[in-house]
Amino acid sequence: MRRTTFCFWLGLVSFCLTRAEPSAAQVAIQSPVGGVIIRGQVYGPDGLPLRRQIRLEVREQSPRSRPEYIYTDTLGRFEFQGRTQVVQIIRVESDDASYAETVVDFIPSGISPFVHVYLRRLEKPATTRPEHSITSAAALTPVPRGARREFERGVELVRKNRPGEARVRFEAAIQQFPDYVEARNELAVLLLRESQLEAAEVHLRRAVEIDPTAANVLLNLGLCLVRKGQPDEAARFLDRAVQLQPRNAQAQLLYGVALLLEGREDQAEPVLLRSYELGGKQVSEAQFHLARIYLKRNDAARAARALETYLQDTPNAPNAAQLQEVLRQLQQAAKTPQSEAPQF
């Protein structure tokens, strides 16, 4: 069993652009209201993890459900936000080369649902298309059996909420196979949860050197650097991650926040808008930060619209009552431009 972790603390930047404190969410990803983060791994017809980036169509089992399109990273790993007790459908189109169209139905369960997607071989394979991703030779080196066993044990221990024991397993896997990108990423996530930023950065930077196209590693490194107060450095890695996964709404959100922390509001605005366009209420924090940008420009009307959208999407926000009052003042300021807009 394999899993990838994208350590994304939305609580890091939701309500204060100068603080960086992790949430206690499982593997640091906050679940949406009434929903969960669903992770998965795509395997090729040979039963091995698919080492390429492909598009997945995700929807709920309902005629009115609109499909969402997400992309795996270059190791065939993915994640998206869904709801428990609702059948989720994942569809993978045929590549007309090595695998046929595949559809998987499942019901998410547990704290951190995980789904395995096994692609079926085409009965009459066509000529294989060339790969377009750039992966280092080290990343393509087969993982020794012993190292893989340690890694899988570590993953199971994380699922059982035994991070200390999991850390030992990941360290053992890396000792046996220093170029083990997934093990370094998982270990870094545990270190980030313990606020051991320097140690996490070492593993993430090495993982990026091994596989420059590992999008989740780039995102975790970006988050680590944001928490260290280095948004300019973080933005470089997050920019690469967004280029690898342009439809990853959470990646766009974190990139936009890094730009905003760096003081590049004009560049942050379109990134945050794109994040919300892709993820909607699942990345409602984008509207909160847009409201701050518009308020800084003394545009009370646009700030009010953005904050209103945020509150509609996140009615149970911890400071919703306070923000409702701010919204009322913004709306009043928009009607009477000479009045002073509130700060938040």
Image (cartoon, rainbow, N blue to C red):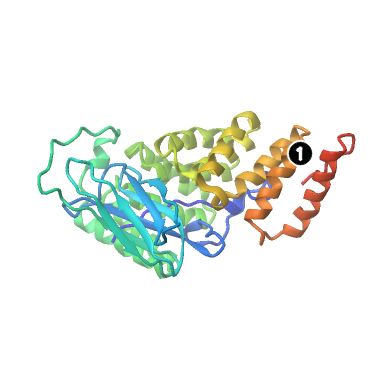
Residue 249: image location, x then y, percent? 50, 44
Residue 160's image quarter?
bottom left
* Relative side of 311 to 117, left or right: right
Residue 112: image location, x then y, percent? 43, 64
Q: Is residue 321 visible?
A: yes
What residue is rendered at 44% in x and 51% in y?
6
Question: In terms of depth relative to the viewer, which is nearer, 135 or 268?
Answer: 268
* Relative side of 231 to 144, left or right: right
What residue is rendered at 30% in x and 55% in y?
173
Question: In terms of depth relative to the viewer, which is nearer, 278 or 43?
Answer: 278
Can you identify the residue that label 1 sits on?
Answer: 301
Residue 190 drawn above or below residue 180: below
Question: In terms of depth relative to the viewer, which is nearer, 61 or 318?
Answer: 61
Residue 145: image location, x then y, percent? 20, 56
Crowding at dot 1, Cα within 10 Å, few <14 / some 14-19 / many 20+, comes out as some
**Amino acid type at mark 1:** Ala
What residue is rendered at 42% in x and 61% in y?
62
What residue is rendered at 30% in x and 59% in y?
104
Residue sitting at the far right: 338
Q: How many marks?
A: 1
Q: Is residue 230 visible?
A: no
Residue 206: image location, x then y, percent? 38, 41
